[in-house]
Amino acid sequence: MISYLNGDIVEISYDSIVVDCNGVGYYVHISKPNDFTYGKCLVHIYYQQKEDGVFLYGFKTKAEKELFLKLIEVNGIGPKTANGIIGATTVNNLISAIESGNVAFLKKLPAVGAKAAQQIILDLKGKLVLDDSVMKSNSLRYSDVYDALRSFGFKTGEIDNAFSKMQNLDQLKTEQIIKECLKLLRK
């Protein structure tokens, strides 16, 4: 089984990338092509073997992959649907919707109807909660970031979008997160 690929991205399309690892190009289905750039990368992989072939699903972060793995455990949710769900929102927004039982939010996601939304909530509610100490420190820090960026006139939706494109947030200081968000918001 493949856990991740560490190599160079040599091709990016609307739903896939090709990762060159020592001369072998791996075709990887992805849900967020804008998260990837050409060159060196580490892509977290879900490996699926079926009668009609082998499929690789790739994720920029380990959190996305772990949420994907939880989603495919839900009755009626396969890898393609889970990949679409991951691509349509952020990890934090999806976890919040599941934990709060927000069926309306889940129904807006690709290939998720009322029945599937209720099944996702039933199967995953309470299983996706982050560690309280991490949540408290992150929520205080992110609150400061949101306040700073809103003072510059940015809307919450714009800030959420910038957050979803950032990597390694846990390793960055508040000031660094604000600077990175500003770079993304100015584009």
Image (tube, grey):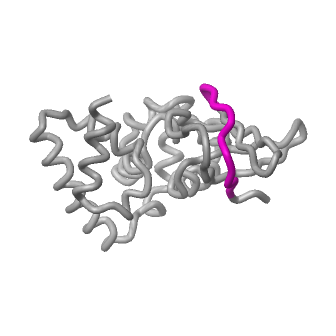
Residue 78, relative to residue 128: is it above or below? above
Viewport quadrant of the C terminus: top left
Taking the spot 56% from the left edge, 30% from the top edge, the residue there is 111
Along the line of sight, the residue nearer the viewer: 50 or 157: 157
Report whether residue 116 is seen: no
Looking at this view, name the residue that lies furthest to the top: 14
Q: Main secondary structure of the magenta part?
A: strand
Q: Which residues are magenta?
A: 4-15
Looking at this view, name the residue that lies furthest to the bottom: 133
Name the spot of residue 4 as percent of width and height, x first.
Answer: 68, 56
Along the line of sight, the residue nearer the viewer: 122 or 182: 182
Name the spot of residue 115 as percent of width and height, x first.
Answer: 53, 37
Name the spot of residue 113 as percent of width and height, x first.
Answer: 51, 31
In this image, 143 relative to 151: left or right? right
Q: Quadrant of residue 137?
A: bottom left
Residue 161, relative to residue 47: is it above or below? above
Report whether residue 131 is seen: yes
Along the line of sight, the residue nearer the viewer: 72 or 136: 136
The number of numbered discs placed on residues in the rendered structure image is 0
Taking the spot 69% from the left edge, 53% from the top edge, the residue there is 5
Name the spot of residue 87 as percent of width and height, x first.
Answer: 52, 37
Q: Is residue 14 magenta?
A: yes
Taking the spot 48% from the left edge, 32% from the top edge, the residue there is 109
Q: Is residue 35 magenta?
A: no
In this image, 118 relative to 157: left or right? right
Looking at this view, name the residue that lies furthest to the right: 51
Viewport quadrant of the N terminus: bottom right
Residue 182, relative to residue 141: is it above or below? above
